[in-house]
Image (cartoon, rainbow, N blue to C red):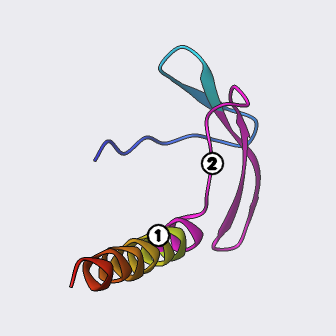
């Protein structure tokens, strides 16, 4: 993991087309702004983990149904 220090209104650039800017720092909370192409999905980590779990569950059920059809 790369760790960078940034102050309010400072940014980093990722892959020439994603800009992450520190918008606000309040106590132990940091507000970030992300500018990226629309085709790049951006999720909070906990939301992404939930999506991955739901996708896995859906494929597990789909695979079970397919196996039952074969039996």
Could you give the CA–CA distance between mark 2 and mark 1, rounded to whole angstroms? Answer: 17 Å
- Assign the C terminus to one quadrant of the image: bottom left
Tell me if label 2 and label 1 are in contact, CB under 8 Å: no
Q: Nearer the viewer, mark 2 or mark 1?
A: 1
The residue that disc 1 covers is 55
Q: Nearer the viewer, residue 69 or 20?
A: 69
**Residue sitting at x 53%, y 13%:** 16
**Residue sitting at x 70%, y 73%:** 27
Q: Name the mark on residue 8.
A: none
Where residue 70 sits in the image (x, y, percent)? Answer: 24, 77
**Residue sitting at x 36%, y 45%:** 3
Where residue 14 sits in the image (x, y, percent)? Answer: 50, 25
Where residue 2 sits in the image (x, y, percent)? Answer: 32, 42
Question: In the image, is 15 to the left or to the right of 47?
Answer: left
Residue 20 vertical placement versus 44 (above, below): above
Q: Nearer the viewer, residue 13 or 49?
A: 49
Residue 3 vertical placement versus 37 (above, below): below
SS type, badge 1: helix
Q: Which residues are magenta?
A: 20-49
What is the count of numbered marks?
A: 2
For residue 30, what is the image quadrant?
A: bottom right
Residue 42 vertical placement versus 57 (above, below): above
Residue 22 vertical placement versus 55 (above, below): above
Question: In the image, is 32 to the left or to the right of 18?
Answer: right
Q: Name the mark on residue 42.
A: 2
SS type, badge 2: loop
For residue 68, what is the image quadrant?
A: bottom left
Q: Residues within 10 Å of mark 1 (few under 14, many from 20)?
A: few
Q: Residues within 10 Å of mark 2 (few under 14, many from 20)?
A: few
């Amino acid at each position: 993991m790369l760790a960078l220090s940034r102050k309010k209104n400072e940014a980093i650039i990722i892959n020439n087309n994603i800009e992450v800017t520190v918008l606000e720092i309040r106590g132990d909370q940091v507000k970030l702004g992300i500018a990226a192409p629309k085709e790049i999905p951006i999720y909070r980590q906990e939301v992404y983990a939930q999506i991955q779990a739901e996708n896995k569950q859906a494929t597990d059920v789909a695979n079970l149904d397919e196996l039952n059809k074969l039996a």
